[in-house]
Image (tube, coloured by chain):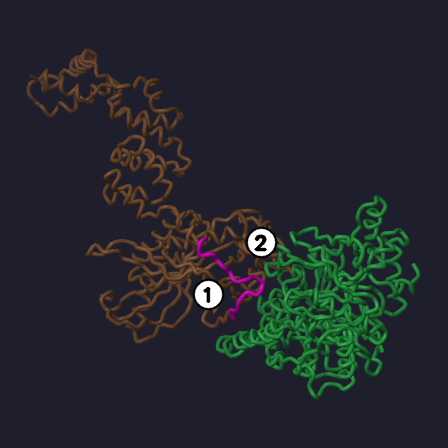
Amino acid sequence: MNVADYTRLGAAALSGKVRSGEVAPSEVVRAAFERARDIGAGPDALNIFLHADEDASVTETKEVQEHLDSAADVGILAGVPIAIKDNIASLGLPTTCASRILGGYVSPFEATVVTRLRANGAVIIAKTNMDEFAMGSSTENSAFGPTRNPHDIRCVPGGSSGGSAAAVASGITPIALGSETGGSVRQPAAFCGVVGVKPTYGRVSRYGLVAFASSLDQIGVLGRTVDDAAIALEIIAGFDKSDSTSSDADVPIYRVSALGKPAPEARQPDTEAMRIGRSPVPLPPPPGPETLKGIVIGKPKEYFPDSLDPSIKSHCERALDRFRSMGATVRDVSLPRSPLAIPVYYVLAPAEASSNLARFDGVRYGLRVDPGKGLKPMYDATRSQGFGAEVTRRILLGTYVLSAGYYDAYYKKAQAVRTLIADDFRAVFADGVHAIFTPTTPTPAFPIGAISDPYEMYLNDIFTVTANLAGVPAISVPIGRVRRLPVGGQIIAAHFDEYTMFRVAYALEAALGAEAHQ
Amino acid sequence: MTRDRYEMVVGLEVHVQLKTRSKAFCGCSTDFGAAPNVNTCPVCLALPGALPVLNEHAVQLATRAALGLGCTVNPISVFARKNYFYPDLPKGYQISQFDQPLATGGSIAIGKDEKGDDVRIGITRLHMEEDAGKSIHDRYPGATAIDLNRAGVPLIEIVSEPDMRSAGEAGSYLRTLKQILQYLDVSDVSMEEGSLRVDANISVRPPGQSKLGVKTEVKNMNSFSAVERALEAEYERQCALIDSGGKVEQQTLLWDGGRGAVRPSRTKEGSHDYRYFPEPDLRPLILDTGWIDDARKNLSELPDARKKRVGEEFGLASGELDQLMVTPALADYYEAVARQSRDGKGAYNWVMGEVSASLRASGQDITQFRVRPADLAQLLNLVRDGTISHTAAKRVFALMLETGKPAAQVAADEGLVQVGDEGAIAGWVDEVLHEHPEEAARYLAGEKKLQGVLVGFVMKKSKGRADPKRVNQLLSARAG
């Protein structure tokens, strides 16, 4: 398959060509690897992948081919290459979380999301680089070197799902999986000019996602277009009996690519999840004054501070104008407790992390450094050498806030404020607002090494972290460029209302057209 | 005496393994005795990305235990992580419950005081948690081996109030608790297999003082009597320490049964900060009040209620009931025999006599006992209607045990059916008097006390078949 064609096509179109027999799945996978070589995805350039095996991936397409040959249903992602963040357990390729402590670790089981993608014909071609254990906003915290932004190799791609965002942005795969705890999909999506989705907490099974902060973690999707992201989410969403926090709420059809055609079912080999056969968006192309008729878009003042980069602000205003021109009402709203989100997040997330990362102790798997002086020195040496600086900082922070005498002042107080932040969102949505629009990040991508103060780095997540704390779904879509670097706009919807989130996102994507990348 | 100057105050923490087929948070088997690390999976090995899923059966059993101990089962309880590092704790935390346990506020009666009132021991709380694995320090020189088969097995922890005032009371509490849990069928409650473990908190104080003294925690007891001995030893140690001007220090001690003394644990328990916080991987456990009510209604009969009912039905004394009701299986056996023979007293004598003796001799459990209740009831019936003598009955019982045949058949096969026929008995009496001329002469001359000896000879000659009442009557008649 011609590489130029490959990078132009979305997941739905690629899968269509594979199903119609126009291209073989093995050719699609070869094209993905060819593109990776062309663009310089290797460790000496963009450093996007931690693990990839072209021959194994091509071999994997055999099964898809066999289904095609026997005229069996091959699934809605037939032959589509997908990259997976390295903190999602996969059979075959290692799962290291970009940490020395899991160097070379191969999981004996697979994450539910990976199983669901494969069941729909997708081919996992690589594990992507990330901030170690998903702790970071730039992918500079990888033990295996930073990933570079395909739009400007001097800049970070964002993080922690920087490798996944870069893989999609550079045209290697139309879809990649990332994970979110405080903005780790949306922020790199914005920095790399792609679409990034954080689903409602509980929408997607966490089984097989290496835990960072369990009450905030969600697997998310990155796509070149809204439709790419929608297809992927539709497949991975839904109840999983292996994750007690996954929801049994119905999963609608999110794909706009299914519009007007009989939509093939997304297959879930393992679940009881229900599907509603509701086609996604009444979106007559091109978008017109009726497209978002009756939709109320909330513009929260706390997310448009005076300090906001004026170029980002003007891109946001342009997007809001497009909403109005499509028949939506834009309403000023307030999420008054949102400014407390960063401190709340940096109490709760490290607290859970300090416990979640206790299992990396050198006893059963992964790195063991044993000075031969007994148990405690083995623990000390293994964990000191296995974890990087940011992970160590957060484990210490989390251990501190959970300690006797500090628990009430930090963890308990932070939980109480978290509830208030979520209440703010509920109140706005209960008041007739269908979606909230904000900038995804306060700035575009910054140069590698530019931010050394951890707190300054944490502020990258200031507009995204609230959705994690509140558990609501959010998407970042490209809304333009600032100094040649992409910036994103964020659409936040009510709990389990990804449907509306996608509807608004499709409309914005269509209305902006090429402007989204200008 | 020390005992007059210091009062012993004891509270017990009892861990009980629930009788589930699979572990608390994964599908692995809970079988005891499998090869090391066979019953493990990504969840109980704490592999990266694995998540716990609560075993519903464990919740059912824990709820049943809580209700049986008179606790209030909370409609909402919360799992929490107890964080600490140890090689046999794969996740680096134990999933337990902390400030919102499954159940609170129960009590059990462990006996009567001098006034005849119940002595009750309060139960502070009952919560669910998972077991850790096993560290084996003595198998490989210079290394510790880890077996994670037990990691994730469901436990309940039952915490008592500091209501016990002697080692004996602690022993009674444990025996009563064990019995109740057996009746509820929630656990094997075997200290040998580790399905029941006891940690004891003990302090001393002058009588009349309401403030509690500084406590120590004593671990590593492998039997109830070891608990009692450890408490005695620790009580003496604390008293002696205070008498010599010292102060009791809060610490964890290990019972050394061989030396009959406690020694300090190597780990400094007091310095542990477990950093409990709600387990984010599990939702709060919400129990429907209707479900809890159903569980209460379906609770099996508890020992005290059963004693009362059986005592009234079969006219047994309190001490006799205590013996019979010690385990639900023995109680079931007894009740079946008593009901089918309509002879509560006779059933008691047999169950506590021949049956218990055979069980002791063979080391068997009553549930595996060859003579089933219906067979024993038939034997009792045969004795009562005079078909076989009491002497013969013991032989019949022995043969039933040996052959597994029913009582009537054994009695018939062995010719042990009692003979009441005057002629036959008279014949045996004549023969005995003839074969023992000396005793016969003395007896007939009026030495009445020899009658017993002669009856014995007749019974022996008749192989137990002669009706002893008739033999006595005939002999008395001969003596004139």
Chain ID for green: A
- Residue A199 visible: yes
Question: What's under tag 1, amino acid-wise?
Answer: Gln
Quarter of the image with the C terminus of chain B is top left
Question: The residue marked by circle 2 belongs to what chain?
Answer: B
Picture layout, residue A486 above or below residue B181: below
Quarter of the image with the N terminus of chain B is bottom left
- Residue range in magenta is B275-290
Picture layout, residue B144 above or below residue A344: above
Q: Which mark is residue B127?
A: none
**Which is more toward the observer, B31 or B104?**
B104
Residue at the disc numbered 1: B100
Helix or strand or loop: what does disc 2 sit on? loop
Picture quadrant of residue B236: bottom left
Q: Is residue A208 left or right of residue B148?
A: right
Q: How many marks?
A: 2
Q: Which mark is residue B26?
A: 2
Q: How many residues crowd mark 1 within 10 Å: few (<14), some (14–19), many (20+)?
A: some
In terms of sequence position, does the residue under pointer 1 or pointer 2 come before the other? 2
Question: The residue marked by circle 1 belongs to what chain?
Answer: B
